[in-house]
Image (tube, helix red, strand yellow):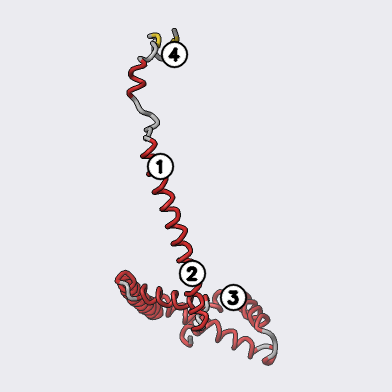
Amino acid sequence: MTYCLLDPEPVTEVDEEMVSDVDLNNTLTDEEREEILSELTKLEEDISTLRQVLASKEKHHSELKAKLGITPLIEFKQNFNRSWYDMQTSTAYKKTSETLSTAGQKTSAVFTTLGTAISRKFGDMRNSPSFKSFEEKVECTVSNIKQTKVGSQGGGGSFEEVLSSAAHASAQETPSNNMSESSDHERTC
């Protein structure tokens, strides 16, 4: 008696009648076997003949192409051109092309609108009182530098020297003197 690890019941021997009822080999009679072998042989001969015919036709095909001057490179170009044409005429390609064109137009419109908005904002900023005040201060500073440069050194010196002399001159001015000059300067600037 044999015990199975999963089943606590002992394994019993199988009935021989059950085994004989199952035909595992699917046995054929000698006549059926010879008939099948004969058919198999005929099919193999047909396949061999067809391969020979195909090889002959392929050889003739390549000879005709050689006479016409059709090379593999030319064939590749023709196939590529044909495929490219087929792709361009497909509905998927046309829809994609139209979608990309529309997207490009919309993107261009967005950038145009954005550029216009930025230009308008810069214009508004330039016209603002803060910017005008800043612009006036810069203009006054430049004119002060020019005046300082002309007043001292007789027109010589670098830009840095002019700046330092302007800073030095404004630092030496007294507060009362500075206020009177400042009010005079505001009138002129």
Q: Nearer the viewer, residue 124 or 58?
A: 58
Residue plotted at (66% across, 78% down): 164
Which is closer to the viewer, label 1 or label 3? Answer: 1
Q: For residue 34, which numbered disc appears in the image?
A: 1
In the shown orientation, is residue 186 left or right of residue 129?
A: right
In the shown orientation, is residue 56 left or right of residue 109?
A: right
Q: Look at the picture and state if 131 lies above or below 33.
A: below
Task: Kindly tell me whether residue 25 is visible in this rendering.
Answer: yes
Residue at mark 4 to residue at mark 2: CA–CA distance: 66 Å
Which quadrant holds the N terminus? top left
Q: Which residue lies under the disc numbered 2?
A: 56
Which is closer to the viewer, label 4 or label 2? Answer: 2
Task: Kindly tell me whether residue 128 is visible in this rendering.
Answer: no
Residue at mark 4 to residue at mark 3: CA–CA distance: 112 Å
Query: Residue 177's x, y, as percent?
Result: 56, 79
Mark 1 vs mark 2: which is more N-terminal? 1
Q: Amino acid at mark 3?
A: Thr
Mark 4 vs mark 2: which is more N-terminal? 4
Residue at mark 1 to residue at mark 3: CA–CA distance: 131 Å
Task: Give the residue at the far front of this rendering.
Answer: 31
Q: Which residue lies under the disc numbered 3?
A: 174
Q: Look at the picture and state if 111 lies above or below 28.
A: below
* Element under disc 4: loop
* Element under disc 2: helix
Mark 3 vs mark 2: which is more N-terminal? 2
Q: Nearer the viewer, residue 146 or 97?
A: 97
Q: For residue 5, which numbered disc appears in the image?
A: 4
Question: Contact, CB < 8 Å: mark 4 with mark 3?
Answer: no
